[in-house]
Amino acid sequence: MRRSYAYWSLVLLFLYYNVDRWTPLGNWKGEHRWPVQNVQSSLDILVGVVLLGAIVSFRTDFHPGMILGTALLALQTYFHLQAWWLPYFRGVTSPRAIAFHTQFLEHTQVLPTFGNHFPPDAEHTFIDFFVFPAFFFCLVATARRLFGRSPQSSAS
């Protein structure tokens, strides 16, 4: 798999993430007016900077940046699996987990709720639509680049 898959998946993730986090998208994420009330703005700025660093690293074949970007995508993938997907497939029973998940039910939904299985809202479903492939492509590209593929065979 070429580095360009990793590069373009990061570009798409960066674009979606920033539009999503800084634009009032109505019920998509429960934000209806400017300025967006982004309670995690510092984290979102950090994520944007990290994604830009990863984009540049995969474009320029900067190995430490590729490794760091892939590691941080792995961390984001882990957190999203723990926060959204495992609770959806397993169901939730604690009052705290139920309260967390029910607060998103007024947002746009693309997956069904059944019993105590609360889906991620559309915002997080689509973030993961970009995060999971980006992590996969970056992991493969980084592994191939570091463990035996020549620069010519992985050129963008």
Image (cartoon, grey):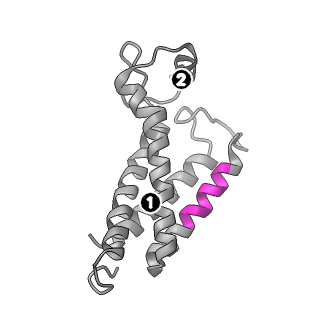
Q: Which residue is mark 2?
A: 106
- Indicate yes or no whether the magenta region holds residue 47: yes
Picture quarter with the N terminus:
bottom left
Q: Is residue 85 visible?
A: yes
* Disc sitting over residue 12 in the figure: 1
Could you tell whether 141 is left or right of 68 in the image?
left
| Left or right side of 143 for 61 | right
Identity of the residue drawn at 52% across and 36% down: 28
| Residue at 54% across, 62% down | 51
- Crowding at dot 2, Cα within 10 Å, few <14 / some 14-19 / many 20+, comes out as few
> 58 above or below 123?
below
Q: Quadrant of the C terminus?
A: bottom left
Residue shown at 62%/63% (left/top)?
49
Q: Is most of the magenta stretch helix, strand or loop?
A: helix
Residue 148: image x %, image y %?
A: 28, 78
Residue 85, disc = none
The three-letter code of the residue at mark 2 reads Glu
In this rendering, position of residue 109 left or right of residue 51: left
Amino acid under label 1?
Answer: Leu
Where residue 108 appears, as percent x and y from the top left, is: 47, 30
**Magenta stretch in the rendered image:** 43-52
User: Distance of mark 2 from mark 1, alpha carbons?
Assistant: 26 Å
Question: Magenta segment: does it hold 33?
Answer: no
Secondary structure type for disc 2: loop
Residue 141 quadrant: bottom left
What kind of element bears circle 1? helix
Q: Horizontal and vertical percent for residue 56?
A: 51, 74
Residue 14 x, y percent position in the rendering: 51, 59
Mark 2 or mark 1, which has the lower sequence index? 1
Callout 2–callout 1 Cβ contact below 8 Å: no
